[in-house]
Amino acid sequence: MRRRREPPLTFVIRLAVLSLFPATTAVAASPVEILISEVRKEDQEGSILIAVSILNSNDHLEAVVLPNRIEAQVVQSGATSTVWLERYANMPGEVAIPSAGFYRAIYIMRSASGLDISGAAISIPSWSTRQVVVEPGIMAQPVPTQGEAIAQGSPPAFEENAIVRSKADRTSNNAFLTNLSAYEPVYAVYGPGTQTEARIQFSFKYQVFGTRNADRAEQSWRDGLHFGYTQRMYWDLSARSSPFRNIDFQPELFYLTPTRTFSNGTTLSGQAGVRHESNGRAGEDSRSLNTLYVGPVATLPLGNRYHLSVAPRVEVYVGDLSDNPDIRQYRGNLSLDMAIGKDDGLRLSTSTRFNFSSGKGAFNAEVSYPLQQVLGGGPNFYLIGQSFFGYGENLLDYDRHSTRFRFGIAIVR
């Protein structure tokens, strides 16, 4: 196969290092008021349930991320102890709270049988919650509601809410469905004038031992084990019969460390895994590779509801590369993802991969904005603009230089 070699991407790499940006977990937006509303014993084992009321007094929808683990402080008899709270099994990782609405989230303090917190004061520093005095009692399994008006008082009990399932609802009799969650962005974009006008991506991750949370099991290393899948489709709409020019398949097995939240709101976590990439084709168009990767993810609050996240990654190639023996020259072993923005507004995210020795690589940038902010209501999509510059937008073209601009919609950014 004849390789096309274009000028080095040195200036693109410099630009990427200065301005790259991945969407990642952030703590609650500052205009949302968060209060500890109740602290009680859960059962005879001594675990403690902590109810946190999240109030939105703004005139617009607010998206709030609930971390898996968050640090709390217990003050008793002048001594301060640090404890970790885990998000309760029924709680989603992110909630959208309407204007003048609230959400009641539940966190659990495990292995607290040896800690007598009666009369103690507890607070969550990263959420700037006031200290509340603890008076343990017995609390039934909580199932919070969301979107109720603040003026209506406390949320109604779960038994008062009817559950209606349609034929398309697969939650019934599928106990493991709650283990599924978003992973990479999900979008459909279009840009005329190329062989791949349309680019479509969907992605998900699956927590392999997620039911341990539902069973309220002790925290274990197994909680971080995930399976992920991402698929990118490149659609040549202008060609006869409109074929898919290339489809990239990316299954992977990876491990996510628990998120550490610091007092200033910064969060830190890590990810490591093994990924297989292929385009499912045969002959000269076949492409495949396997990589092992590791990298941290840090998110920093910037004030005024903005957050900056940074995720460098190192990967090594393993196994057979006969379909694309020189792919390392075009992709390298280093990548950097970054993102800046706010949950309910504009976000700029970029990703870059590079090989310093060959001067080759690629730069991808995305700008997104909630469509409901433009129209004053749904539909629930993000407007997205996407650009690519460099080598290997897809596996088939790993050694070809291209420039792409596309626009469309996303449901995960």
Image: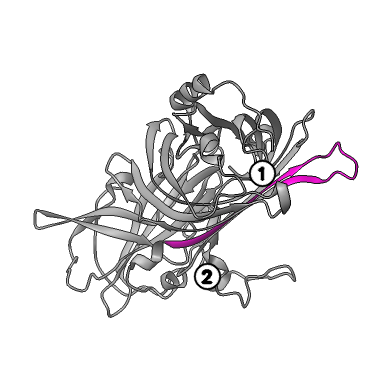
For this view, does 306 lie left or right of residue 236?
left
- Residue 21: in sight, yes or no? no
Image depth: mark 1 or mark 2 in front: 1
Q: Rounded to the nearest whole Å, what is the CA distance between mark 1 and mark 2? A: 35 Å
Q: Residue furthest left?
A: 78
Disc 2 target residue: 158
The image position of residue 332, as x and y in percent, is 48, 37
Q: Residue at x 31, y 78 (%)?
A: 43
For this view, does 389 lie left or right of residue 359?
right
Q: Residue furthest bottom?
A: 44
Magenta stretch encompasses residue 232: yes
Colouring scheme applied when the structure was drawn: one colour
Q: Residue furthest right?
A: 240
What residue span does the magenta drawing correspond to? 225-246
Q: Nearer the viewer, residue 292 or 318?
A: 318
For numbered disc 2, what is the local secondary structure? helix
Q: Residue at x 58, y 42 (%)?
A: 413
Q: Amino acid at mark 1?
A: Tyr
